[in-house]
């Protein structure tokens, strides 16, 4: 099925946040966030922090804490949420997102954010950028790390929030975990290859289609009006 057909069948659009909407750590780097999380873990004596010395992905640190069965996982998640809320103040907007939202509005498609980042950070970013009116809802990270994508939990939750069925939805994300989560929830997925190497990775992960610019999504949506 072509990406045009995927969008023709979709009345509900799910967008990942970090990538299709913005680069959340574009100004407040993920490395700094990861370092602050690791420093907190050292202070809490919550986990063998040496095993995380080279880890720069804050979300992977949450996974590691959960695997270690540390009771501090909720504290770490709350700290990460606070750091994400700070980070969105300097997040770098994705190109052509506004055009995509306008196109969805014109074609009466509802747009929801489905993210491994915290809902608090997403809501703050949308407010700062004046995007709140273009988004019908936000489904962000639950405190339990294992429920993050690639688990289908957030996508299934979004279907419930949107009052949609899987065949009516399309997920647009820039990572293989987005593809895995969408397909596990029986939702088609368009991969957004916004960085070198992602085109191959998203294709190999089984994305139903892959684009390299959000402007392609806008064109696909508007093409349904022809």
Image (spheres, rainbow, N blue to C red):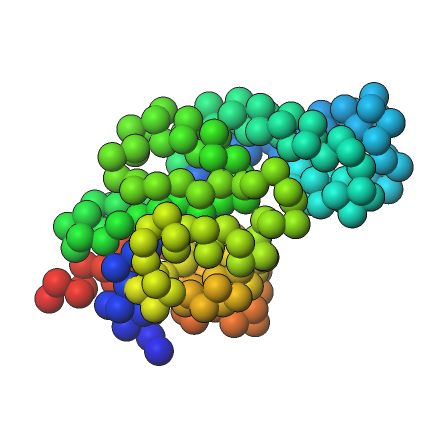
Q: Is residue 210 visible?
A: no
- At 40% from the left and 36% from the top, the residue drawn is 93
Q: Quadrant of the N terminus?
A: bottom left
Residue 90 locus on image (x, y percent)? 48, 25
Placement of 85 over or under 59, stated as above or below: above
Residue that sits furthest to the bottom in the current view? 1
Placement of 29 over or under 144, stated as above or below: above
Residue that sits furthest to the left in the current view? 226
Taking depth in this image into account, of 156 and 98 the one nearest to the observer is 156
Q: Is residue 65 visible?
A: yes
Taking depth in this image into account, of 19 and 177 the one nearest to the observer is 177
Taking depth in this image into account, of 14 and 218 the one nearest to the observer is 14
- At 61% from the left and 38% from the top, the residue drawn is 143
| Relative horizontal placement of residue 49, taking residue 182 as reference (left or right) | right
Q: Quadrant of the C terminus?
A: bottom left
| Relative horizontal placement of residue 118, taking residue 209 as reference (left or right) | right
- At 33% from the left and 51% from the top, the residue drawn is 162
Placement of 99 over or under 196, stated as above or below: above
Residue 175 locus on image (x, y percent)? 54, 56
Residue 99 locus on image (x, y percent)? 25, 46
Residue 173 locus on image (x, y percent)? 46, 55
């Amino acid at each position: 099925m072509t990406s045009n057909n995927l969008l023709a069948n979709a009345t509900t659009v799910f967008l990942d946040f970090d990538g299709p909407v913005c680069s959340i750590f574009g100004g407040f780097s993920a490395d700094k966030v990861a370092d602050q999380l690791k420093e907190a873990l050292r202070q809490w004596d919550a986990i063998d922090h040496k095993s995380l010395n080279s880890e720069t992905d804050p979300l992977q640190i949450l996974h590691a804490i959960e695997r270690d069965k540390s009771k501090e996982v909720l504290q770490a998640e709350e700290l990460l949420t606070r750091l994400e809320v700070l980070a969105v103040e300097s997040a770098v907007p994705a190109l052509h997102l506004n055009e995509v939202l306008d196109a969805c509005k014109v074609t009466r498609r509802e747009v929801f954010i489905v993210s491994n980042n915290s809902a608090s950070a997403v809501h703050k970013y949308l407010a700062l950028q004046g995007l709140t009116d273009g988004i019908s809802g936000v489904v962000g990270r639950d405190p339990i790390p294992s429920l993050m994508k690639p688990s289908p939990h957030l996508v299934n939750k979004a279907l419930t929030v949107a009052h949609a069925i899987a065949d009516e939805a399309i997920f647009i994300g820039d990572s293989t975990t987005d593809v895995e989560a969408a397909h596990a929830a029986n939702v088609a997925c368009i991969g957004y290859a916004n960085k070198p190497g992602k085109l191959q990775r998203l294709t190999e992960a089984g994305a139903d289609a892959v684009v390299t610019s959000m402007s392609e999504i806008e064109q696909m949506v508007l093409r349904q009006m022809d």
